[in-house]
Amino acid sequence: MTSDGRSPILTLRNIHKSYGPIEVLHGIDMDIHAGEVVALLGENGAGKSTLSNIISGTVLPSAGTMTWQGASYAPANPREAMDAGVGMIHQELLLLPHLTIAENIFVGRYPMKHGRVDRGEMESRAHRGLERLGLDISPRQYVEGLSTASQQLIEIAKALTLNAKLLILDEPTAALGGEETKLLFKQIERLKSEGVGIVYISHRLEEIKQIADRIVVMRDGHKVQEFDTADLPVRTIVEAMVGRSMEQMFPTLAVPDEETVLEVSNFSSPSGRFADVNFSVRKGEIFGIAGLIGAGRTELVRAIAGADPIRSGSVKLNGRDITPNSPRDAIGNGIVLVPEDRKLQGVILDHSIAENIAYSNFESVGRSGWIRSHRVREFADKSIRKFGVKGRGRQKASEMSGGNQQKVVIAKWLARNPRVVLLDEPTRGIDVGARSSIYEIIHALAADGVAVIVVSSDLEEVLGVSNRILVMAAGRQTGILDRDEANDVSVMELATA
Amino acid sequence: MTADQDVGKSRLLDMISIRGATGPLIGLLLLCVFLSIATDSFLSFRNFLNILDQITVLGIMAVGMTFVILIGGIDLSVGSVLALSMMVLGYLNVEAGMPMAIAISGALLASAIAGAVSGLLITAFRIPAFIATLAMMSIARGVANMITNGSQIIGFPAWFNMGAIIRYGGFLTMTVAVMLIVFTVATLYLRYREGGRSLYAIGGNPEVARLAGINVQRTTVLVYVASAVLSGLAGVLLAARLDAVQPSSGVAYELDAIAAVVIGGTSLSGGTGGVVGTIVGVLIIGVLRNGLNLIGVSPFLQAVIIGSVIVLAVAVETIKRRS
C-alpha cells in the first residue's frame, strides 16, 4: 500500500468468481491509487485475466464489492467501465488497419455535426490524445504500417480520449522491442504523473522492476503476496509466483561431445536481415542465440531450417554440405524448427493434437503412404505421454494451454530422431511452471546427442540454458561467448554493439 | 473406454463413418421420408436409379471442389472447364475422326492444362484463387466457344450414349459406375493417403504445413489440376448422357458444386470436412430436385428452396460448432 495517505481510486473487496461449480477467484482484495503502477503477476491460469476482466466490466463477479473514486462500482459491460473511466488495453491489438488513427480512436463514437462525422473535431481531439503521449504522428495516417509500439500507444490514446483514470495494460510489451518498450515506459511515467492509475500485467519480470511501484502476485485464484516495492530480486518474485524455490528451474548442463554436428558458414539473407554468420554446434550442445528484437535471430534459424531463402553461405551436417532449399529438405536431413509463433506457424489450432503430430510424421503412422488412424492415435498418445502433455490425442490444439501446445510442437518432431533442433523463443507466453518442463525437454535432447539451438529474448533463459551463446546485433554476429564468460552484462554489451 | 476398445472399434467405424456429416445425413433421411409420404412415385428403385443418373455430373465435380475447398481455395472455373472438355471431346472424336479413347484423353488433358494454369497463377504469381479461377472461367468458356465458333457438335458413335442408358446388371449405367469409382477413390484418398491428409494440414494453416515438410505449392497446383480433370471427366459423362456437346454447357455448375460441398459440412475456410459429407450434399440437392419435380413445384420455387437449404445446413453446422 502506498504511504502517501490518499484514499485509493479503486478498491476491490472480497471478489469471488465462479464458473458453474468451479471457483476461479477466491476473495481478492486490492487497492489501486491514482498515479501508481501496480504490477499484477502470476502464472497463466492464476486469475489475472479474470480479475482484470472484472475491473473492466467484461466479466461480472459472483460476489464482492468494488468502489471507484469513493462510489460503489459495478460495471455491467465494458462500455459502462469505459464511461466511468476504466480502460483496458488487450494483449491482442484491436485496431482496424485500413482506417486512420483518428477513425480508430473514435470508431463507434464519432463526433457528429449536422448529421455528418465531424472530421475536423475528430482529428483535433485525436491529435490532443496523441500529443499527451508524446506521439508525433498525424491522426490522418493509416494504422496499417505503423509499428506495434505505435499501435499500442494508439490504443492507450483511445482510452485517454475517454478520460480514463485507470488503465489496465495486458502484456503491452509482448510484441515490442527494446527501444519501443523504452518509449512505452516513458509514456507510462507521464500518465502516472498526471494521476492515472495503472494495472500492469506482464511475464517480463525485468520490466516490472523498472516500471512498477507495487507488485501483487496471484496464484490459483488467490492473492498470495503483495510487495510494496518492485525493487526485489527476480528470484523472490518468481518464487512467489510458482510457490516453490527456483533452484531447479534450469537443470545442470552436461558437457557436450567434441564432434561437430552443424556448421554454418558465411550465411547471409537476401534481404540483409542477417549477414556473414559463422558458427558450429557440437553433438549434445545447447547453443543459445541472444540479441535484441530485430537482430536477425529468427530469420537466421528459419533460413537454417530451409523456411526462408538465403543469398549465400552453406549449412554442413557432419561435414557434408546440405544447405536446404525448403523445410522439407532440412527435415529430410534431420534439421527441424520449432517456430517463434506457435499459433501461426507451429500448430493448426482447429485440428486435433493427434493430427497435428501426424502431419510431420506421415511415414511413422502409415505404410507406403497409407495412413492408419489407429497408428496416428497410438503415436500421438505415446508422444503425449513422453512429454507430459496434459491432454488427449483427440483434443483440439486450441483447447490446450500455451505450454502444452508448445510441447506438442516439439513432440511432433522428436519421433524423427532429429540431429539438429532449432527452437525459436521456446517459452514465449508460457507460464513459469510449464517453462521448467520445456527446459527439461531441451536438456534431454542434448543428452541424447542432438545439437540444440535456442533463440531467446529472455536473457536469464538464454544464460541458464546454453553451453555457448551467439550474440547478434542488427543482423551481424557480434560474438560467441562461452558459458563461463557469459553474463547479462557481457551479452548486452555485444547485443548493443 | 479403454485404448484397445477404442482402436478395434475405430478400425471398423472409420471405413463407414460420416464424421462431421451426421447433420446433413439426418436432413437427407428426413427429406426422403417426407417425399416418400408426399408422393407415390418417389420411393421406388427406378426413381432411385434416376436420381443417381441425375447427380453424376454434379457429384464428380463436387468431389474436385471438395479438394479445393479443403485446402482453403475455391474453383469457379469448373463449369467452363466442363464445357471445354466436352468441346475438345466432340472436336477430336466427331470432327477429327479420332478414336474415342484418344478423344477422351485429349479432353482430360485440356482440362488438366486449365487446372494447372489456375494452380500456377495461384501459387507462383500469388493471385487469389477467387480471381485466378474467375479468369479461367472466362478463358475456358471462350476457348470452348472458339472450337466450333459457338455451335454444337453431334454424331458420337451410338455405343457412347448407350453407356449412359444401358443399366448393366439391371441397375448400373457406365456413367453412374464412374461416379461411384470416383467417390470411393476420393474417400479413401482423403482419409488414408498421406497426400489426402496433407490437404487438411494445408487448409488448416499453410505455413504450419510448409514448416512440417509438406510441399504446399506443388500440392496446391495438383489440387487445381485434380478439380479440373474431374470437371473434364464430368463433361465426358455429360456428353454421353446428352449424345451431343455444346459450348454453353455447365453454366453456373460451379455454384451447385460449391453448394453441395458446403451443405456436406466442409468449411469454406478450409481444413475440415470431407468427400463423404459432399456425397450427402450432392444427394440432398439431387433428391430435392427430383422430389420437387415429382410434387410439381416450379423450377423458380425450387431455386428458392435450394437456397434456403444451403443457409439451413451452414447455420446448423455453425450453431453445432459453437455449442
Image (tube, rainbow, N blue to C red):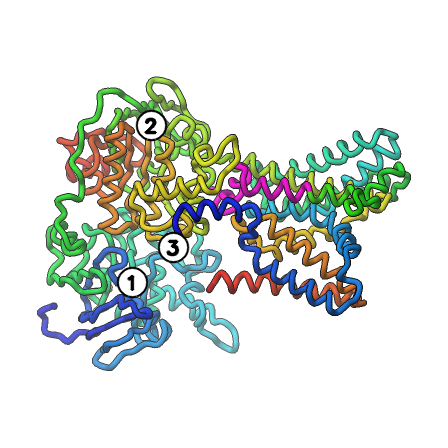
Circles 2 and 1: CB atoms closer than 8 Å: no
Q: Is residue A93 above or below residue A387?
A: below
How many angstroms separate mark 3 from mark 1 (CA)?
17 Å
User: What label does residue B9 carry, if any?
Assistant: none
Please provide percent x and percent y for residue A251.
17, 38
User: Residue under circle 1?
Assistant: A49
Please provide percent x and percent y for residue A389.
31, 47
Protein chain holding label 2: A
**Eye-nearest disc, 2 or 1:** 2
Q: Is residue A495 above or below residue A145?
A: above
Q: Residues within 10 Å of mark 2 (few under 14, many from 20)?
A: many
How many angstroms separate mark 3 from mark 2 (CA)?
31 Å
Please provide percent x and percent y for residue B283.
68, 55
User: Residue under circle 3?
Assistant: A399
Asked whether the viewer can see residue B239, the reply is: no
Q: Is residue B189 magenta?
A: yes
Q: Which residues are magenta?
A: B181-207
Q: Amino acid at mark 2?
A: Arg
User: Magenta span: helix, strand or loop, mainly?
Assistant: helix
Q: Amino acid at mark 1?
A: Ser
User: Residue under circle 2?
Assistant: A419
Farthest residue toward the bottom?
A71
**Which of marks 1 and 2 precedes in the sequence?**
1
Q: Quadrant of residue A360?
A: top left
**Eye-nearest disc, 3 or 1:** 3
Protein chain holding label 3: A
Disc 1 element:
helix
